């Protein structure tokens, strides 16, 4: 790295966030509906969605996911491949707090919160990208989830307000 500026793009964000792969960066404004993907020189992809963006993640291989609200569900997780094509949309009745892709972009971990019965319940669902069924799941009562991350060997770490858990 030489410190030379290779890209300078104007933006007007109120709550800016960035997630990166090895060669691209996804930039979005939490609570707004549009995002852009940049390489070192230009915006290579931009899209405006129907609902506000809650969260996003980008795998090392350039695939990415975006969490939004949904009209018919609590939330939707949109997964795109590294060519910016929509691979799948995973709908949840619960509020999706965080969604992360595995390093190779083949698995999606979704942490959601359901408090419909008076007690908050954390739900962790893992899906194979491109498939409609849940690959594995776990539930934890009484925890408010904050984030989820893939560890090595496809283990998953979930942090909540009262605990951190690692799942195989």
Image (spheres, rainbow, N blue to C red):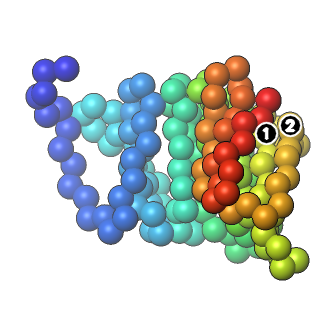
**Nearest the camera: 161 or 123?**
161
Answer with the quarter of the image where residue 50 lies: bottom right
- Mark closest to the chain's N terminus, 2 or 1: 1
Q: Is residue 17 above or below residue 117?
A: above
Callout 2 environment at 10 Å: few (<14), some (14 to 19), or many (20+)?
Answer: some
Q: Secondary structure at mark 1?
A: strand
Residue at image point 67% right, 45% down: 164
Q: Is residue 116 above or below residue 41?
A: below
Q: Which residue is mark 2?
A: 135
Q: Is residue 79 left or right of residue 113?
A: left
Q: Is residue 140 left or right of residue 20?
A: right
Q: Is residue 54 above or below residue 105?
A: below
**Nearest the camera: 126 or 72?**
126
**Nearest the camera: 19 or 83?**
19
Q: Is residue 147 left or right of residue 36?
A: right
Q: Which residue is mark 1?
A: 127
Q: How many numbered circles are shown?
A: 2
Q: Position of residue 86 (x, y in %)?
A: 63, 44
Mark 2–mark 1 distance (CA, rounded to whole Å) = 5 Å
The label shown at residue 160 is: none
Residue at image point 39% right, 47% down: 18
Q: Position of residue 22 (x, y in %)?
A: 42, 25
**Nearest the camera: 125 or 69?**
125
Q: Secondary structure at mark 2?
A: strand
Q: Position of residue 133 (x, y in %)?
A: 88, 43
The answer to whether the residues at label 2 and label 1 have Cβ atoms under 8 Å apart is yes
Residue at image point 85% right, 46% down: 138
Q: Quadrant of the C terminus?
A: top right
Q: Is residue 130 above or below residue 118?
A: above
């Amino acid at each position: 790295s030489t410190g030379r500026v290779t890209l300078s793009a104007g933006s007007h964000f109120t709550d800016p966030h960035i997630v990166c792969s090895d060669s691209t960066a996804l930039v979005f404004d939490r609570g707004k509906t549009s995002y852009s993907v940049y390489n070192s020189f230009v915006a290579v992809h931009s899209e405006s969605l129907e609902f506000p963006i809650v969260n996003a993640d980008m795998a090392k291989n350039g695939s990415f996911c975006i969490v939004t609200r949904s009209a018919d569900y609590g939330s939707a997780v949109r997964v795109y491949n590294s060519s910016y094509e929509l691979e799948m949309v995973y709908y949840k009745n619960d509020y999706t707090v965080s969604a992360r892709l595995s390093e190779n972009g083949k698995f999606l971990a979704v942490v959601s919160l359901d408090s419909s019965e008076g007690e908050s319940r954390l739900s962790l669902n893992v899906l194979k990208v491109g498939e409609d069924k849940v690959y594995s799941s776990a539930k934890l009562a009484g925890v408010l989830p904050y984030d989820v991350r893939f560890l090595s060997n496809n283990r998953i770490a979930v942090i909540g307000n009262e605990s951190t858990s690692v799942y195989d």
